[in-house]
Amino acid sequence: MEEKEKDKHLFALIGKNISYSFSREYFSKKFKNLSLHNYEYINFDIQEITELPEVIAAHKNQLKGMNVTIPYKLAIFKYLDKIDKKALKIGAVNTIKITKKGKLKGYNTDVYGFENSLKPLLEPQHTHALILGTGGASKAVAYALKKIGIKYKFVSRTPGKKHTISYNDLSQKTLIKYTLIINCTPLGTHPNTNQCPTIPYQFLTPQHFLYDLIYNPAETLFLKKGKLQGATIKNGLEMLELQAEKAWKIWNSVS
């Protein structure tokens, strides 16, 4: 029995109030399909990031990799031994590989997932984007947009930083120019499906593309309101699947 426990490959999601976890279900199915019977994916559902070292210590002989979600994609930095250059530039980590020496190295696979799920639906008019929210996920989105060549502004309830405007600044004139709108806030996530970002939806047109990083529900109120105006819409499920597969490759790469 001890030998079996020793050989276990454990993976986990670090987050807060994450019982809904996409990652746990996704990787559990993946392990089953690949007949990886000694692989397990669990949730590290912690109320404060300061709890993390103790949680990791309790599983350190089995833990091989972790994903990071809201609200710890930025706070995780000080608990890492190394950070990938790209993740450092992005300013957010959502994937952690644990090396053979037990060191924690941070990566960002959100950029890969977002970019590759977005690009097939882009049209010539999508040259300027509004990023709703300023958390860890929004940093990955901004990095991907810059890479693609799309100019952007962040929209925040508390503007003040560079490239950031407030929701009150959003007018018809703004939306004529910014035809790509990405929701990086948790507004509209199950079970609070009656919520959505406060943008002037009446000024949306079929020229617009609304992308929501939320995947549950599949069609948020944000997307529904865009759809009513004829806008192209997409949720975050494909992004999550793509970033998960990228994380899997990182975990299985030779250090």
Image (tube, rainbow, N blue to C red):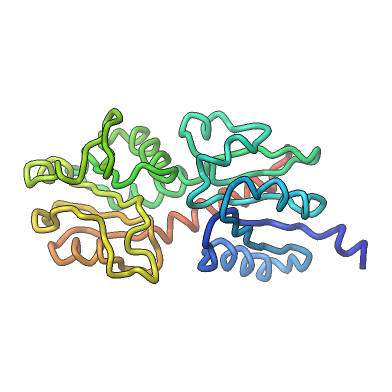
Residue 206 lies in quadrant: bottom left
Estimate the x, y position of residue 121 in percent, counting from the top left. Answer: 29, 52
In this view, the residue farthest toward the right is 2
* Whether residue 132 is visible: yes
Residue 152 at least partly seen: no
Q: Residue at x 33, y 46 (%)?
A: 133
Residue 149 or residue 176, whichever sits in front:
176
Image point 35% across, 68% down: which residue?
192
Above or below, comparing residue 60 to residue 39 in the picture: above
- The quadrant of the image that shows the C terminus is top right
Q: In the image, what residue occupies the spot 37% across and 57% down?
A: 186
Measured along the vertical axis of the image, is residue 207 above or below residue 219?
above
Question: Where residue 41 sits in the image (x, y, percent)?
Answer: 67, 62
Residue at screen point 64% across, 51% down: 66
Residue 167 position in % (x across, y down): 20, 46
Quadrant of the image containing the N terminus: bottom right
**Can you say whether 80 is above or below 60 in the image?**
above
